[in-house]
């Protein structure tokens, strides 16, 4: 193999510690088929995975789920991340995470906390989460995070029910003491795909939201960092999904399967290796799933000869499969895709139907 | 740009850490959702930002350790610290 073919070092590891979660958000990024508790990796295995990740060049580990606090051994896992030299980011719903546990995590070396907030209006927030009282608990835990001196990010997933309140949501993040807020438009995979018609905003709502984020960025410059995840059904070019397949990051499921992105299991025929049987370095370099769409050799037209092929890598492979029916096709979100009209048709399907809540 | 005074005691805030990673080829400054490579000079400056030494003391120490002109070191230190403070990666 030429030196050019050696994959770069990954920077980030998304560790899905469990798929268990008290909330039922209808846009949950977990797969429809959740890993059962009995299959979850133990903390000693996670510690080995973290050491192997650091050896591969990973710098940051995102401790996610489900709700990571559903695991009793979370402090041991945080400690293992610290000992491996990784920067640890806890991605939590804040429901089921007690102040006592949070203190233990801070003592174990936790670096950063990200709390999801469903809406600035508490009643709507609890409805979206499918959990009465969730909003109040989140606000209380955010205060504890700030009190401990840990940096706080607030993550707000945006969709039709809350898209008109972006300004209020950013104000809330500021009031909670967050240094950073993510305005993340729903990405349609897993549970969100199932609920697409109930979640999808209109084009004019999305345009207004994008403008508003720009205004808020200028207004709050120096007080809070606003990061935005774009609503890609209305985009002209696709997103460089996970920074390119097998280029920047890895995702480990609760049961130990290693995926190039959290949704990759929807693509039929991919062979995923598990940390129970292989080292992370072997998986990164040689597992069939990571090799499948790495680089540009797998591409078809219009991606193959496109000047943006090293910029967006043809977009998202999962979305290509889900909408165009072919994981090697251009992401249909791209206006150059022959399937682009399908995306417009799908975005036009907006129905006032009850959410199909995610359930554990 | 943030103002860097000789008497301030710079330190990395909670959530910002300097780490060494062999596979990434050296020292890295880690922050929420962000990573920065620190070259040899940046590393020498940053490892002294513990909140104990003042900017003047850090500059003296570097000038002595590397036997280099104090004014030049002072300019390098002030530039780096101001850049990092603007990004909220350093407390002055």
Image (tube, helix red, strand yellow):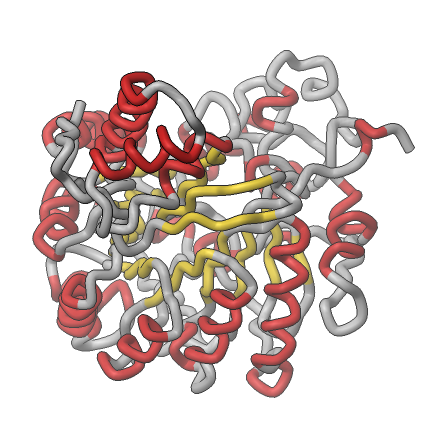
Where is the N terminus of chain A found, in terms of image quarters? top right
In this view, the residue in front, A162 or A105, is A105
* Image side of residue A321 versus residue B75, left or right: right
Q: Position of residue B39 (x, y in %)?
A: 49, 31
Q: How many marks?
A: 0
Q: Position of residue A99 (x, y in %)?
A: 22, 79
A186 in relation to A101, above or below: above
In this view, the residue in front, A109 or A265, is A109
Q: Position of residue A168 (x, y in %)?
A: 10, 46
* Image side of residue A73 versus residue B13, left or right: right
Is residue A92 in view?
yes
A338 in relation to A282, above or below: above
In this view, the residue in front, A37 or A325, is A37
Residue displayed at 61% across by 80% down: A44
Residue displayed at 34% across by 49% down: B16
Is residue A347 in view?
no
Residue displayed at 12% across by 57% down: A176
Q: Position of residue A202 (x, y in %)?
A: 30, 35
Residue B49, by quadrant, is top left
Q: Residue furthest right?
A: A1
A62 in relation to B23, above or below: below
* Image side of residue A183 versus residue B33, left or right: left
Residue A137, by quadrant, is bottom left
Residue displayed at 46% across by 78% down: A20
């Amino acid at each position: 193999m030429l030196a050019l073919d050696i994959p770069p070092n990954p920077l980030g590891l998304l560790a899905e510690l469990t798929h268990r979660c008290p909330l039922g958000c209808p846009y949950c990024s977990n797969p429809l088929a959740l890993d059962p508790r009995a299959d979850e990796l133990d903390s000693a295995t996670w510690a080995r995975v973290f050491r192997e990740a650091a050896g591969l060049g990973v710098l940051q580990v995102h401790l996610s789920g489900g709700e990571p606090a559903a695991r009793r051994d979370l402090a041991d896992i945080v400690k293992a991340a610290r000992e491996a030299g990784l920067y640890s980011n806890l991605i939590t719903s804040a429901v089921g995470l007690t102040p006592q546990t949070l203190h233990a995590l801070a003592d174990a070396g936790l670096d950063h906390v990200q709390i999801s907030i469903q809406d600035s209006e508490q009643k709507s927030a609890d409805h979206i989460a499918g959990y009465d009282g969730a909003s109040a608990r989140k606000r209380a835990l955010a205060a504890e995070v700030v009190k401990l001196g840990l940096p706080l990010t607030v993550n707000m997933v945006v969709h039709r029910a809350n898209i008109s309140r972006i300004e209020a949501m950013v104000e809330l993040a500021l009031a909670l003491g967050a240094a950073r807020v993510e305005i993340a438009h729903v990405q349609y995979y897993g549970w969100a795909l199932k609920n697409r018609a109930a979640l999808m905003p209109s084009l004019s709502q999305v345009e207004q939201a994008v403008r508003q984020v720009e205004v808020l960025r200028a207004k709050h410059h120096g007080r809070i960092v606003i990061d935005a995840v774009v609503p890609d059904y209305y985009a002209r070019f696709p997103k460089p999904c996970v920074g390119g397949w097998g280029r920047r990051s890895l995702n480990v499921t609760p049961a130990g399967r290693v995926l190039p992105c959290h949704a990759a299991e929807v693509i039929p025929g991919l062979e995923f290796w598990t940390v129970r049987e292989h080292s992370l370095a072997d998986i990164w370099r040689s597992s069939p799933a990571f090799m499948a769409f790495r680089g540009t050799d797998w591409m078809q037209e219009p991606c193959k000869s496109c000047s943006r092929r090293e910029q967006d890598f043809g977009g998202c492979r999962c979305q290509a499969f889900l909408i165009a029916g072919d994981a090697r096709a251009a992401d249909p979100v791209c206006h150059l895709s022959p399937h682009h009209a399908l995306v417009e048709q799908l975005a036009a399907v907006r129905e006032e139907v009850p959410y199909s809540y995610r359930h554990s | 740009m943030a103002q860097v005074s000789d008497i301030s005691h710079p330190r990395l805030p909670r959530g910002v850490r300097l780490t060494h990673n062999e596979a990434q080829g050296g020292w890295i400054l880690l922050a929420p959702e962000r990573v920065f490579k620190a070259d040899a000079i940046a590393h020498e400056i940053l490892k002294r930002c513990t909140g104990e030494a003042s900017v003047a003391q850090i500059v003296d120490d570097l000038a002595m350790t590397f036997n280099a002109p104090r004014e030049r070191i002072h300019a390098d230190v002030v530039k780096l610290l101001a850049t990092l403070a603007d990004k909220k990666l350093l407390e002055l």
